[in-house]
Image (tube, grey):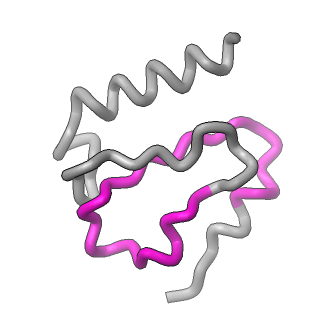
Amino acid sequence: MEDRTVVFDSFARPLLVIHGTEDGFIPSRTRRGPTAAPGCPRFLKGAGLTPMWDRSEATSEAIIAWTQGLRA
């Protein structure tokens, strides 16, 4: 699978990437996420391909914390 994460660096707006540590679908080399985005990527231990289902509360907390950081 081709690493397409380089496109993240061209985004002009803040970007949040949440990734499950147990995700067996996304290759590990693409887990670096957007390096230019503060706090990204956010990894959720024990979550798989769908962290919003596997760890819904932790996903919500990560989103809230990230959006609050944008306001600071």
Q: Residue at x 65, y 55 (%)?
A: 34
The image quadrant where one finds the C terminus is: top right
Residue furthest bottom as drawn: 1
Q: Is residue 13 left or right of residue 15?
A: right
Residue 43 shown in magenta: no
Task: Specify the segment rendered in magenta.
Answer: 8-33
| Majority secondary structure in the magenta region | loop
Instruction: Tell me where residue 15 appears, x and y as whole percent.
Output: 63, 41
Who's the residue at 31% across and 58% down the image?
21
Q: Classify residue 22 as left or right of residue 64.
A: left
Pick out the residue farthest to the top: 72
Asked if the magenta segment contains residue 12, the reply would be yes
User: Position of 32 compared to 22: left or right?
Assistant: right
Q: Image check: 5 left or right of 49?
A: right
Residue 27 percent across, percent down from the top left: 41, 78
In the image, is residue 17 above or below residue 65?
below
Relative to the observer, which residue lies in front, 7 or 43?
43
State the count of labels.
0
Residue at the image position 31 percent from the left and 54 percent from the top: 20
Locate residue 62: give its quadrant.
top left
* For residue 68, above or below residue 24: above
Quarter of the view holding residue 10 = bottom right
Q: Which residue occupies 51% across, 77% down?
A: 29
